[in-house]
Amino acid sequence: MTSTHDRQEGTVTNSAGDYNSKIIEEFRANQGRVGGIWAGTPMILIHHVGARSAIERVTPLGCFPQPDGGFVITASSGGSPAHPGWYHNLKANPTITVEVGAQTFTVLARELDDAARAELWPTLVAEHPDLGKHQARTTRQIPVFLLTRQN
């Protein structure tokens, strides 16, 4: 996979795309560290292929490193009423490339079932209280994905 961003493909022209592009640039320039509101937050770049478009996109996300070397990401979208676009892409194409720090590798993205999510959710909210606020803003259950390294 190439590491192109949708903005380079000409498909993102809104401020969110520009915002993400700046985070991606800072992430890559600083081996995975970014400043501003994201300072101190573990970050991951997910490369995902559009479920309908087949265009590769790169999205920066806060993540939760796991003791076993995996990562957890949440599809909170700030508590919006709809899942973020990348959610549908991971459901359709769960084998993705990620960037963590200066490393790039393949992971399998698996959405946690209700029981596994319920078990992990309190720990995630304790680590990142804004996640609980995001859940309170929406009636949808925020999906949680476990990313397991494949290579």
Image (cartoon, helix red, strand yellow):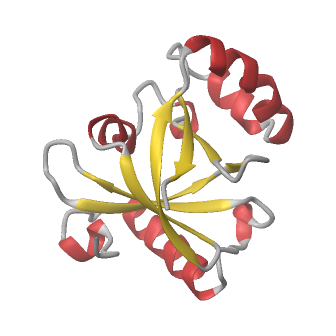
**Residue lying furthest bottom:** 29
x, y percent for residue 87:
39, 37
Residue drawn at point x = 55 percent, y = 71 percent: 23
x, y percent for residue 131:
70, 34
Residue drawn at point x = 59 percent, y = 88 percent: 29
State the residue in front, 42 or 139: 42
Residue drawn at point x = 34 percent, y = 42 percent: 85
State the residue in front, 130 or 91: 91
Tell me the quadrant of the picture where the N terminus can be found: bottom left
x, y percent for residue 37:
72, 61
Direction from residue 61 to residue 120 in the image, left or right: right
State the residue in front, 41 or 18: 41
Q: Is residue 129 above or below residue 43?
A: above
Q: Is residue 85 above or below residue 69?
A: above
**Residue lying furthest left:** 53
Residue drawn at point x = 73 percent, y = 47 percent: 68
x, y percent for residue 108:
45, 46
Q: Is residue 75 above or below residue 31?
A: above
**Residue lying furthest right:** 126
Direction from residue 132 to residue 98 in the image, left or right: left
What count of labels does the image hold? 0
Name which quarter of the figure residue 90 lies in: top left
Q: Is residue 110 above or below residue 41?
A: above
State the residue in front, 102 or 50: 102
